[in-house]
């Protein structure tokens, strides 16, 4: 027996016998099945329960399957919907495809085909769950980092593109005063040091050290900084800086500073490794969903061609059945005629025997 899929499926049909049989079969394949008698009841269920996929008939009272599909697209985005119908109406099929139906199946349902459709849906749902969990973890990590560190981001030329609230609070500058500026506004260390840092970053190596910064008020403060080369959403180089404010006394105490740097460096390494892993997983899962989406679009097109071929085959079959009926009628007529001819031949043979006997009698 196949393992149950981690899906909650809503089955919608106005015929109790059909929805009962369908839900019975679905419970063998998925973990949870909910039923509704029409589209209106289905929407009420979707408002209060977590549903992963909807399987619905087309023709139903109050709200039919296509109206339900349209409402789902408006309210729940790309929630997977499988359309069932006992009719080979091409207009229904085309509208269902336009509205983003995952599959269009004809009754009576082929359970093997339905299982395959549900497996595809389960794979996409599982990937989306994993992506949501990874995204939530990433957001929690970013929130935690924002509460404890000064975070900024710069483009390849070293111009600031982002600062968090801690960065603004410690520096004394507003966000508007910082965005678009170079770090020279805070770190008057000269071009030589800036060039050395940029050279190391452009060779795809992180930089770690202590900066002596100046607030807007002119007051000096120290930050222990880790700068990491990354890429933005368009693939362009950018640099992420994570800073922690330290006291001048800590900076001057070399041994304590060394221990602090090693500890913070390991923390940064672990944090950045976590971010890298999460970003890689998100990218891989996004690519997988794009591939699945392309495969499903291709599958929809194949289904449409398959349905058209079935309709043509049905026409040929009906024509062949008509020809067979005509031939059967002709065969019956020929059989009756054949029997009549055999009767006449037998009668003629009897008559011939009688004439033969009469001729022989006359000769004697």
Image (spheres, grey):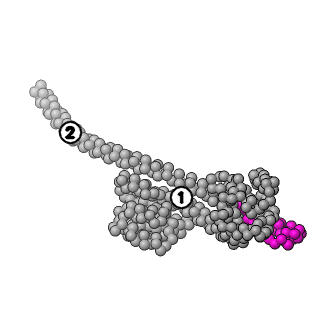
The N terminus - image quarter: bottom right
Q: Secondary structure at mark 1?
A: helix
Q: Which residue is mark 1?
A: 120
Q: Position of residue 143 (x, y in %)?
A: 66, 70
The C terminus - image quarter: top left
Q: Is residue 69 magenta?
A: no
Is residue 83 left or right of 358 when viewed as pictured?
right
- Answer above or below: position of 273 versus 294: below
Q: Nearer the viewer, residue 107 or 282?
A: 282
Residues rendered magenta in the picture: 240-263
How would you rate the neighbour count of disc 1 (Cα within 10 Å): few for under 14, some for 14-19, many for 20 or more? few
Is residue 298 left or right of 348 when viewed as pictured?
right
Q: Nearer the viewer, residue 112 or 156?
A: 156
Q: Position of residue 247 (x, y in %)?
A: 81, 72
Q: Which mark is residue 289?
A: none
- Answer above or below: position of 29 versus 322: below
Q: Is residue 233 visible?
A: yes
Residue placed furthest toward the front:
218
């Amino acid at each position: 027996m196949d393992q149950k899929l981690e899906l909650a499926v809503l089955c919608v049909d106005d015929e109790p016998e059909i929805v009962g049989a369908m839900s019975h079969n679905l419970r063998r394949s998925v973990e949870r099945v909910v039923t509704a008698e029409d589209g209106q009841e289905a929407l009420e269920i979707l408002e209060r329960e977590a549903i992963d996929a909807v399987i619905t008939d087309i023709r139903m009272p109050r709200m039919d399957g296509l109206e339900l599909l349209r409402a789902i697209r408006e309210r729940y985005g790309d929630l997977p919907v499988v359309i069932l119908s006992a009719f080979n109406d091409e207009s229904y099929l085309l509208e269902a495809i336009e509205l983003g139906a995952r599959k269009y199946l004809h009754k009576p349902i082929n359970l093997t085909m339905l299982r395959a459709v549900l497996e595809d849906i389960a794979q996409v749902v599982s990937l989306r769950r994993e992506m949501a969990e990874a995204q939530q973890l990433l957001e929690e990590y970013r929130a935690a980092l924002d509460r404890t560190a000064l975070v900024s981001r710069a483009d390849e030329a070293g111009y600031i593109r982002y600062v968090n609230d801690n960065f603004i609070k410690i520096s004394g500058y507003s966000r508007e005063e910082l965005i678009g500026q170079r770090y020279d506004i805070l770190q008057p260390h000269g071009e030589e040091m800036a060039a050395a840092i940029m050279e190391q970053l452009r060779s795809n190596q992180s930089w770690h050290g202590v900066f002596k910064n100046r607030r807007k008020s002119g007051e000096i403060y120290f930050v222990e900084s880790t700068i990491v080369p990354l890429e933005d959403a368009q693939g362009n180089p950018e640099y992420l800086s994570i800073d922690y404010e330290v006291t001048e006394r800590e900076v001057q105490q070399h041994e304590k500073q060394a221990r602090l740097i090693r500890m913070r460096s390991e923390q940064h390494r672990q944090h950045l490794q976590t971010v890298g892993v999460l970003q890689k997983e998100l990218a891989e899962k996004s690519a997988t969903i794009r591939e699945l989406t392309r495969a499903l679009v291709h599958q929809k097109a194949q289904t449409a061609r398959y349905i058209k071929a079935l309709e043509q085959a049905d026409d040929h079959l009906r024509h062949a059945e008509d020809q067979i009926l005509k031939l059967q009628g002709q065969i019956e007529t020929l059989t009756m005629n054949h029997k009549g001819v055999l009767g006449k031949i037998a009668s003629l043979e009897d008559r011939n025997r009688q004439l033969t006997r009469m001729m022989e009698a006359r000769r004697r």
